[in-house]
Each structure stands twice: as C-alpha cells, then as structure tokens.
Image: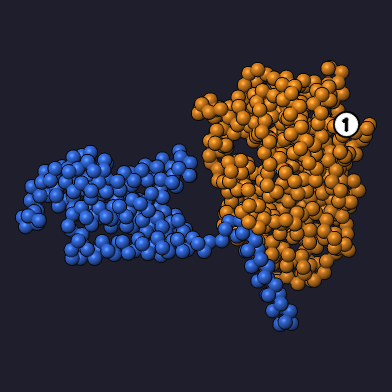
Amino acid sequence: MLINVSGINSHTVLWYASRATGVVSLLLLTAVMLLGLLVTRQGRLPGLPRFAVTGLHRNLSLLSVAFVAVHVVSAVADGYVKIPLTAAVIPLASSYERLWLGLGAVSLDLMLAAAVTSLLRRHLSRRVWRAVHLTAYLSWPVAWVHSVFAGSDLRHGPLFLLAIACAVVVLGATAWRVVAASGDVPRAERVGLLMTAVHARDKSRNRERTLAK
Amino acid sequence: MEGTADAVTELPRLLPPRDGKQGDGKPDRPSDGGRSHDFRSHALRYGMLTYRDRPGDLIGEAEAAGLTGRGGAAFPVHRKLRAVLDAAGKRRRTPVVIANGAESEPASDKDATLLWLSPHLVLDGLQLAAEAVGADTAILYVHANRAHDVGGRLIEAIAQRQAARVDRVPVQLATAPARFLSGQETALLNHLSGGPVTPTFTPPRITERGLNNAPTLVQNVETLAHLALIARKGPRWFRSVGTAEEPGSMLATIRRTDGQPRISEVPLGIPLKDLTGDLRQDGAVLIGGYHGTWITGAQALELTLDNDSLARAEARVGAGIVIVLPADRCGVVETARAVRYLALESAGQCGPCLNGLPRIAAALAEIAGGRARPQAVGDVERWAGLVSGRGACHHPDGTVRFVRSALRTFATEVDWHKRGRCSAANTRPFLPVPQDTARSENDWI
C-alpha cells in the first residue's frame, strides 16, 4: 500500500489509528471470549477469586467496545477511502471492501447486542440474555474473518501469526468447554451420585477402622 | 343463613364437623368425608360466596383479622396481597393467583385432607384472592399421587362451580411432582412454566415478577380457606380463637406414639400437651416437620402452639406438624433417616446444599449406626454452619435447623451412640420417609 511508505502524518493518522485499534480490538475480543468460556465453566485464574474472573470478562468487553468504536469512527472519518458511517452497522453498505466490511458490521451489531443486553440484564429474563449472549460464538469468528481479510495487515509477518494464534486459542478453548460440559453429571443425578460416593467412602473407612482393631 | 353461620363459629371451622366430638380437645381424624365436595352442601353450610366487587377491599379485612400464611412461613397475608396489587398497578400487568396445595412435607397431611373434605372453601378463597388483587388467572396446584384421588374430586368440584356460575375467574388444576421442594414458591413457578421443580434465586420477588413475569400471588390452600371464611364472617369472628398476636385456628397434623396421622383444627396458642397426649419429661416432640425442630418432652409440656411461645425452644409452628417420638424409638436414628431423605431431595443446584447435605447425612448415619469417628459430631456442627443461609431456597437452612435441634435434644442419646449403644428397643422406622427418590430429570418435571 502507498500509505505504508509515507509514514504517520496529519493525513494518515486516522488511517493508522483505525488499523491499530482494529488489531487491539481483535486481541481484546479474544481475551473476552476466553474469559467468557472460562466463566461458563466457573473457572478460576491464578490468584483471582471467581467473581474477579467475571468482572474481568465484563470490563474487558466494555474496553473492547471502546476500541472498536475508535476503530470504526477513525475508519469512517479518514478520507483516503470513502466509508459511509452507515456501513459501520449496516452490512454491505460500503462500496469499499463490501463483503469484508459487511462482516465487520455484522460482528459489531452482535457485539453491541451482547453489550446492551448485559447492561440491561437486571431487566431481562435469563433466557433472553443468554440467547443474545450465545451469539458471541458467531460474532467472534465473523470479527476474525473481517480482521484478516478487510486489510492486509494481518496477512503477513508477525501479525499473521498473531491472527492464527487467536483463532487457535479460541477454537481450543471452545473445544475444551464442549468436552468439559459433556462430562457434566445431569443436575437431577448429582445429589444421588454424591450421596452414594459419600456413603461408600464412609463404609470403606469404617471397614479400615474395624480391620485396624 | 345466619343460623347455619353461627354453627361454624366453633372449631372445626374448615373441616366438616364430626359427630359431636368437637370441643373436647381430641384431635379427630376425617375418614372419607362422603360427598363433602358437593357444592350444594357447601353452600348450605357456609352460605354463598360474597364478592367485594372491588379489587383491594378484602385486603383490609385480612389485615384486621391478622391472617398469616398457613404454609409454614406465617407471612402476613395482607402484605402479600398488597404487594401483588401494587406491582400490578405499577407495571400494568394483570396478576396471577396460585393456590398452593403441594404439601411436600412427608409428615404433613393437612392440605390433602382439607382439599379432600372442603375443596370449595379453598376454591372460594382462591376466587376472593383473585378478586382482591384483580387477577384473571387462578391455578390450583396439588400433589398428584397421594393416598386419595384428590385430583379427581377437585375436577368434580370445579365442574360443579362452573355449573353454578360462582367462579368469576376460571380455575386451572396443576399437579406437582412428588418432590420435597415442589411447594417452594419459585420452584413451583419454574414447574408451571414447564421446567423442573427447582428453586431460583430471588429477587425478583414473585409478587413483582412471577408466572410469565406477571405479579404472582401464591398462598397455601388452608390460608385461602381461612380467607373465604373471613370474607363471610368478618375479622372479629376470626380473632375469636387464637392468641392476640397470632389469631385464628390452624390445621395441624398430629402423630402420637401410634404413628397414625390425625388432622385436627386447633386454635393457635393451644397447649402442646393437649395435642400430644401422654408425654414424658425425657421424651421428644418434633414441631414443624423435617424443616422443624425437636424439643424435649419437658419443653413441650410447658409450651403452646404459637410462634411466640415456641421461640423459647427455638421452634416455629411451621405447617402445624406435631410428632411425638415413642419411648422405644431412637431420635438419632429417626433423624438420620429423615436427613438422608432431605439430602436426596436437594435440587442439586447450589454448592453448599449439594455438597453439604450428603456429608451431613452420611455423618449422621455414621453416628446413628454407632462406632462413629470421634470427630463426626463436630463435623456435622461445622458443616451445618457452612451450609445455612447460602442456598437459593431455605432447604439447607431448614435441614440444618432440624439436625441441630436433634443434636441438642438427643445429646444423651448421641453420647450413647458414641459408646456403640442405642436406647431403641424397636428398630422399625417411625417417621414417615418416602422411599422413591429422584433418579432423573423426569422426576423433577
């Protein structure tokens, strides 16, 4: 790209800002995704209590919304390529990179829906909130495809490796979550199984005591 | 109508009178009750249902009468009614009224008896409650498989009322799964919404957002029957029995040493010794069922059946269950069996309950079986402290109250067990404990 040659100046600052915040947004959203997967399994991070994992998930997601906002606004405000503001939320509204920017809009819409429903969670039923929140599994891959194909930054060099790494960890974490959930004991059977286990343990302990005597 | 009305100022008020046996303090046991669910005989005995024709009017009367919930919590009825009415006005949603007849406490039989003998009082109360809060949906929620076919009788009763055109709000009949938690308010709503009968965290309170998010009133069936009589005879009549703080009468399930349940309508504040029959100082009485409290015979001889008096023994009236432990049975063994049942009836949702109750039950079984580890009693006490107040519902709290009262009341017996002895001469189980525990999710739906 021509712009790469000329470096950062008053004409290109928005363009660079947009690209940089785009990359940071992808990293943040990856972190949010991983933390979300951890939260669904009531997982812990070393040195953090469980509620702090949830808190981190929430705060990072708000931070990523801020970065995405800068990413979108700077891309629209920059005059080098014409992107209408509507293209930020309406898919296929931009003539520049129509498909890839469209995917960005789709991802942004889903992300905003998840953020808004979470902020209004007190006023919503759990079912509605969860249904919207589940679209994160769609939103993140769409955002990834947008990141890699809308610009050329993530297709070469270290950033390419970074994009691949993001995809691998999210896929891996999702697989871990699915496998872990499949091992769950159904709610109705939990108590009975635990009860049997506790009784069996006590029986064997009693037997040991009798034998010891 | 006045003449017949006066005839019901004596107890029993809610159940059909038995042949001249009231007033002598003897609990009576209704048998089949013939056709007491016949609407005509009900109307003859109590008079027709008197609607107030304005939502909210009955609330003042319930307050003046001092009526409290008879499901166990003794929450003032007028406050619940008011909360639902206010929420309905604020949120512009038409409320739902539910009569809770899911008497899950295995030791209780009073709601099933009331529904069997006086279904129309309950249905009258349901209509009045619906009118008081302006509800357009009324649900009668009862256990499906009790000894009698209550459901079939209720269907007949509802049909008779339809024919007589007394009901302004149509009544739907819903059946409760045979789980201990079936009657818990949030579990009940979860079940009526098509889910398993498992409790959920509050808030939101169900008076604000209950069934389908509508403000929801859930009242025990006996409470509604009292409400139906207050509407006819007024608050002063209601207060003519009971204590000043806890007025009125209540249905009690009484099991004396023969183990047979007797359903008796008693005034609040009645001396416990009038209910228990012969009672030894060193005996034990269970008040309030498996979420209730064991008290010693000496305490029972002094206390009366009201929360004010029972508080001195850390007990509560609850749903009016009074069980006298026979001298030849061991309280520790009986408690251990009941606690095992309670642990198995945990919904398995909240960690403290899911992990705590089975361990408590196992340790109690160990103590009951003799030759327990020396620290078993200490373990139970420690775990009891860890689980109470930490569930979505009060299942762990109630269970722990029961366990702690047993350790207190049967302290001597626990010492015997530590030395591998047991005072029981009779090993046949005494407390009624259902054997069919839930095995899969279907048992919760």
Left or right: A2 in relation to B383 = left
Q: Residue at x 58, y 41 (%)?
A: B193
Q: Position of residue B27 (x, y in %)?
A: 88, 40
Give the tally of numbered discs: 1
* Chain A colour as displayed: blue
In the displayed structure, would residue A57 be above or below residue A128?
below
Q: Position of residue B334 (x, y in %)?
A: 79, 58
Residue under pointer 1: B17
Q: Residue at x 73, y 65 (%)?
A: B365
Q: Residue at x 90, y 33 (%)?
A: B18
Left or right: A154 in relation to B298 = left
User: Which of B76/B339 is in front?
Assistant: B339
The amino acid type of the residue labelled 1 equals: Pro
Q: Residue at x 87, y 23 (%)?
A: B7
Q: Tell me the SS state at disc 1.
A: loop
- Residue furthest toward the right? B20
Left or right: B429 in relation to A166 = right
Q: Position of residue B247 (x, y in %)?
A: 76, 31
The answer to which quarter of the image holds residue B312 is top right
Q: Position of residue B186 (x, y in %)?
A: 60, 42
The quarter of the rendered structure image containing the N terminus of chain A is: bottom left
Q: Kindly identify which chain the residue marked by label 1 belongs to.
A: B
The answer to which quarter of the image holds residue A132 is top left
The quarter of the rendered structure image containing the C terminus of chain A is: bottom right
The answer to which quarter of the image holds residue A69 is top left
Q: Is residue A83 visible?
A: yes
How is this picture coloured?
by chain
User: Which of B240/B411 is in front?
Assistant: B240
Left or right: B184 in relation to B38 = left
* Chain B colour as displayed: orange
Q: Is residue B129 visible?
A: no
In the displayed structure, would residue B319 be above or below residue B167?
below
